[in-house]
Amino acid sequence: MSKLVIVGTVAFDAIETPFGKTDKILGGAATYIGLSASNFNIDAAAVSIIGGDFPQEYLDLLTDKGVNIEGVEIVKEGKTFFWSGKYHNDMNTRDTLVTELNVLEHFNPVVPDNYKDAEIVMLGNLHPGVQQSVLNQMIKKPKLAILDTMNFWMDIALDDLLSVIKNVDVITINDEEARQLSGEYSLVVAARKIHKMGPKYVVIKKGEHGALLFHNDDMFYAPALPLEEVFDPTGAGDTFAGGFAGYLASTGDISFENMKNAVIYGSTLASFCVEKFGTERMIDLTDKEVYKRLQAFKNLTQFDIKLT
Amino acid sequence: MSKLVIVGTVAFDAIETPFGKTDKILGGAATYIGLSASNFNIDAAAVSIIGGDFPQEYLDLLTDKGVNIEGVEIVKEGKTFFWSGKYHNDMNTRDTLVTELNVLEHFNPVVPDNYKDAEIVMLGNLHPGVQQSVLNQMIKKPKLAILDTMNFWMDIALDDLLSVIKNVDVITINDEEARQLSGEYSLVVAARKIHKMGPKYVVIKKGEHGALLFHNDDMFYAPALPLEEVFDPTGAGDTFAGGFAGYLASTGDISFENMKNAVIYGSTLASFCVEKFGTERMIDLTDKEVYKRLQAFKNLTQFDIKLT
């Protein structure tokens, strides 16, 4: 069974959307990536850090889903990373209300020995230096290293970011971040420039407008499934990344053609994530529901123009 | 050969984009729709009105492309409709600088006798009363009536618009207009409401984010082809509509499955339109170029996840 190492936050989130608000609930990039990747037949491990205030039931939840948590350090006297945000009415923009780094401030990720030969490494959004230190611990070069990041690191740690970007195969960022990183408005030109920074594959996430995959002159586009309502977008990008990485790990095929399928799986899983608050929808997601939604994605995108 | 009646403006446009500006050039909804539809083996006729200032060479151009212009009234002492606009840097928004209705103010469209039994009627963006008067002239109910409109008519002639909308099979509008017409933010819910206003098919154009086709609970999504640069978006929506209508006329098949193909043809043709100023790119477009771009659309959207 292929191994997938996931590094990222395991956190508390408090979310407010036009549909309601939550107290501190389970959140964090590694959580969403792990829950999403757990839909595939792989051996996934989360590498993260939490405080003594983190409930055992949340850890059990990850374990029950088959996500190994050996690499999740518990700092007994510390507090878990906390993020709070409020979405605007259109759900496409949000204000961050609170960011308490807490234990994350001194996070030195340790990859468990048994996962140092993992085929796929998914570097969730974190300080680029932390992402690099995970790569450094791998005893053999992963088949595929995937990096997610955000504008915050472009603002305050661009050199570190450019340095780790050089060492990964795939980068996933959103459209505005792609524009910031490349200095180009056109996403086609932006992807080409980012390509030259290292990653052979560039995934640009456009939220409700879907996701684009670039590789040399090849492009692939997956829409987001049009939904009656988006209840809470938190974690959708990480869920996308988890589906993408999980599918590639489970198939062992990192060809561009198979990456198209991985993008569709990522989009499919993300379409569930936004239906309820936080991780709620991902927790009781069934294989049958995923299967039905993949069919919906096919109906949404496949057509039959014969070109001879 | 199937007949397609196209009603809309034949006009002068003056366009400014970040890439440059034009003097008065050939424009108008019926022009773009006609040029786009002329890529199919159909019998298309434009119904419009122009002034004595309109150059014969522009009329010859339409004729050469196989668009019948019997229904284009020439008001010798009048001036042709003129629109001038300036695009902002992101190309997604524009300011209208000049609108001179001129002969359009007293436009009573007359469908040539030979086209009163056309299978497909494409009502380009015009006063809804004018659109209705074209439908009234048809001696048999068209197989498919398609209507394009814009927010302007929702603001000043909503009752007339709702009245003609009842009588068409397909409506094509952009996302903001769909939201205005329905009062709903979610495009899925908006389409459902518009559906209840009459049209069995709702096409929502999202510019650089593609187009959605809705029919009952079925949805289809076609992306816009990601381009290195959009040179001039003028006419892209009409070119889309012309490709959609032209393909359906040429195949004679108005099933939902074939409408998916029509949306892809519309998107393919629109992707050319924006590459140069005004109608320039559409005029020397070859079948081979269209074929190659359809292949690009397939590569962009088609994937191979086996669902058994």
Image (cartoon, coloured by chain):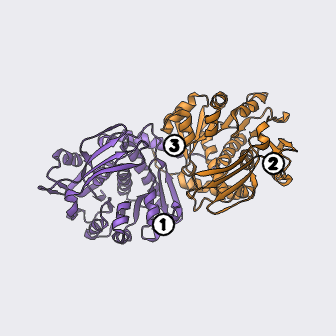
Chain colours: A orange, B purple
Question: Of the residues under marks 3 and 1, which one precedes in the sequence?
Answer: 1
Camera-nearest residue between B16 and A84: A84
Disc 2 and disc 3: Cα gap in Å? 34 Å
Mark 1, residue position: B183
In this rendering, position of residue B242 left or right of residue A56: left
Camera-nearest residue between A30 and A77: A77
**Which one is closest to the eye, mark 2 or mark 1?**
1
Residue B67 % position (x, y): 25, 52
Mark 3, residue position: B300
Q: Residues within 10 Å of mark 3 (few under 14, many from 20)?
A: many
Q: Chain of mark 2?
A: A
Q: Residues within 10 Å of mark 1 (few under 14, many from 20)?
A: few
Query: Residue flagged by tag 1: what amino acid is it?
Result: Gly
Which quadrant of the figure has residue A280?
bottom right
**Residue, far right:** A76
Which secondary structure lies at badge 1? Answer: loop
**Which one is closest to the eye, mark 3 or mark 1?**
1
Q: Are dots 3 and 1 in contact, CB under 8 Å?
A: no
Residue B115 % position (x, y): 24, 62
Residue B289 % position (x, y): 38, 39
- Label 2 in the same subunit as label 3: no
**Residue, far left:** B77
Camera-nearest residue between A113 and A165: A165
Mark 2, residue position: A66
Would you say residue A41 is visible in this rendering? yes
Query: Residue flagged by tag 2: what amino acid is it?
Result: Gly
Q: Are dots 2 and 3 in contact, CB under 8 Å?
A: no
Query: Residue flagged by tag 3: what amino acid is it?
Result: Leu
Q: Which mark is residue A20?
A: none
Which secondary structure lies at badge 3? Answer: helix
Disc 3 and disc 1: Cα gap in Å? 33 Å
Q: Are dots 2 and 1 in contact, CB under 8 Å?
A: no
